[in-house]
Image (tube, grey):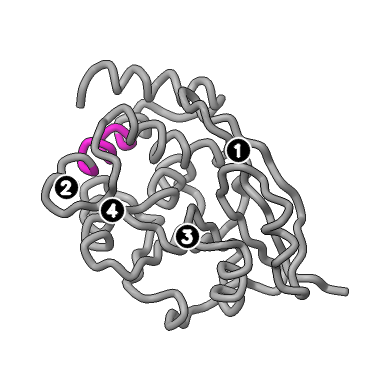
Amino acid sequence: MDLQIKQNLQQGVEQLALNLTQKQIDQLSYLLSQLLKWNKTYNLTAITEADEALKLHLLDSLAIVPYWTFRKTLDVGTGPGFPGLPLAIALPELEFHLLDSNSKKIRFIRQQIHELGLTNVTPHHARVEAFQSEVYDCVVSRAFASLKDMLQMTQHLVAQDGCWMAMKGEYLPSELEEIPKWAKEVNTYRLSVPKLNAKRCIIQLAQRND
């Protein structure tokens, strides 16, 4: 991994005010290098430049760490493991399950779990509609689907007192107007991703109890 990219990663972590160890920084750096290496053969992501992958995959994922207190999270449509793998590296005391229907991407995730020695990650190869599992404290998605579709497709996977965390670009009230009547917006957090000149937010949703 290019020294400049490593320095940019370190600076990004500091800007996000994350208290990560050198081991965690090294794990994140290794994950990024492996993503770029595998991508040349398996086409895991449309992002091929290291600097762009750092911003749009690693730092974008790490920007939500301060909002994470959920014991057991399901990352739906995780792709090659984002935000699930960076969250798992940054929060080793919490449990993460990563779901995707693409076998190549799940193979990549399995290999990274092994090479990084992660004990808090479980990959699942399945379509979300067909995925039957125990329920989770949180379902997170990043550019997976509209809010309406995400809620409807994953309702069976969220605990009664659990929530959804939807990673989005610009906050669009019109998208929230389309969500099912049984769901509600709990909070919206504006995110600032280091070195990324684009709007980002994470929308927290839950089931109505009224």
Sequence-wise, the earlier of marks 1 and 2 is 2
Q: Are marks 4 and 3 in contact (CB under 8 Å)?
A: no
Identity of the residue furthest to the front in this view: 174
Residues in magenta? 27-35
Q: Position of residue 166 (x, y in %)?
A: 59, 54
Give the residue drawn at x 57%, y 48%: 168
Sequence-wise, the earlier of marks 3 and 1 is 1
Res 113 label: 4
Q: What is the distance, in whole Å, between disc 3 and disc 1 at their CAs?
A: 21 Å
Left or right placement of residue 184 versus residue 5 in this view: right
Residue position for label 1: 66
Give the residue drawn at x 33%, y 70%: 101
Query: Does residue 32 lie above or below 19 as drawn?
Result: below
Query: Does residue 9 lie above or below 152 as drawn?
Result: above
As rendered, which of 115 and 200 lies closer to the eye? 200
Res 144 label: 3
Q: Position of residue 109 (x, y in %)?
A: 28, 56
Q: Secondary structure at mark 2?
A: helix
Select label 3 or label 1 by which is in front.
3
Q: What is the distance, in whole Å, between disc 4 and disc 3 at their CAs?
A: 22 Å
Residue type of the residue flagged with mark 2: Trp
Residue position for label 2: 38
Q: Are marks 1 and 4 in contact (CB under 8 Å)?
A: no
